[in-house]
Amino acid sequence: MSSEIAVLNESGIIVATNESWRRFAEDNGGCLNSARNDNVDVGANYLAALTTLPPEPTDIVNIRDGIESVMNGKLPKFSCEYPCHSPEKQRWFVMTATPMHTGDRGAVIVHADITARKEAETLMYDYAFHDSLTKLANRRPLQERLNMTIVSNKRSGTYGAFLVIDLDNFKPLNDQFGHAVGDLLLKEVANRLRDSVREVDTVARIGGDEFVIALGALSNSQTDSHRLAMRIAEKVRKRISDIYTFTVHQGLGEVAITHRCSASIGGALFSPTGSDQMDLFRRADEAMYRAKESGRNAVRFEDER
């Protein structure tokens, strides 16, 4: 796909365009170079046309200043990325302004489609920071967010809590119906966990059928924080234990599969004075194993037996 090119004179008036520019202006109303087709054609003042666009999603004032700085010799080059979304497709472009090389004061404006690059960047980000199956955070962002939560709680003088969640009877489902059905269960568990916590909390999958939740800003009181964390953990336990129903393709037809799943949950509070992440995880993990030893489908905190 060729780039869209326009040449501006020293006043910002478009003196030449290529066919791609004209086609883009006709097809993409509302984007940076297409508020109205007649505003971005030869003879129109492009800088004036920019002032007719809304300030979002791009800072039009800075873009106009950048182009003018190139035209005035204050900048050797100016570029910015901007979205150009429609109901049919989301796209991204980069606009670059470079000075004329003919001795005249003016600028060459080039718009290039960078949607493929943006999509690749998004995919790489997802792989780096999210569990590919459930789309929950993985270990890397969990550590970063947990650290931010610990710092924030220290600043506000509030307690937080860390929950380790291990599914009790996940393997039999995998063994009987295969990994595809097991994956459906893990996705649904992830959805239920998201629905069970607050927006300020972090839910992550750290491997297999093990999940964790970081609860921030509970209370200034240790007793109240423990009570609130236990309430959230019990809500999570009950939500996970609700029956699961899946429809899967087998042979020439569809089969409905119902499954009951429970979870053992261990919790540990972290205080406003700060906590070590590894120690916090260890304490919550030990509490989780005590929940399993107690008969499973239970919640235990580090100070409970």
Image: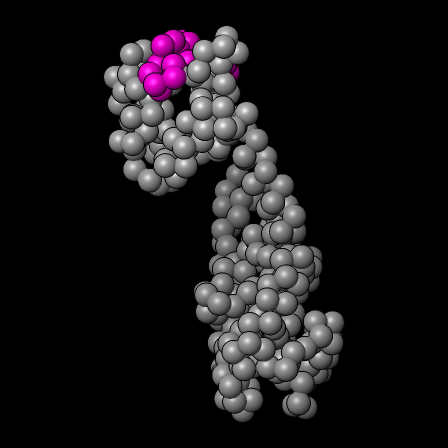
Q: Is residue 296 left or right of residue 278?
A: left
For the point 44% across and 34% down, the residue is 82
From the top left corner, tell me how far across and down residue 52 is, in percent: 26, 31
From the top left corner, tell me how far across and down residue 258 is, in percent: 52, 61
Depth order, front residue of 120/234: 120
Among the 4 quarters of the image, the one containing residue 288? bottom right
For the point 34% across and 18% down, the residue is 11
Number of numbered tags placed on the structure image: 0
* Display coloring: one colour
- Residue 259 sits inside the magenta stretch: no
From the top left corner, tell me how far across and down residue 32 is, in percent: 37, 28
Among the 4 quarters of the image, the one containing residue 300? bottom right
- Residue 12 sits inside the magenta stretch: yes
For the point 33% across and 40% down, the residue is 55
Q: Which residues are magenta?
A: 1-20
Among the 4 quarters of the image, the one containing residue 39? top left
As drawn, 256 above or below 210 = above
Residue 295 seen in this snapshot: no
For the point 49% across and 24% down, the residue is 73
Depth order, front residue of 9/141: 9
Quadrant location of the C terminus in the rendered image: bottom right
Depth order, front residue of 263/131: 131
Residue 193 seen in this snapshot: yes
Depth order, front residue of 54/175: 54
From the top left corner, tell me how far across and down residue 111 is, in percent: 46, 22
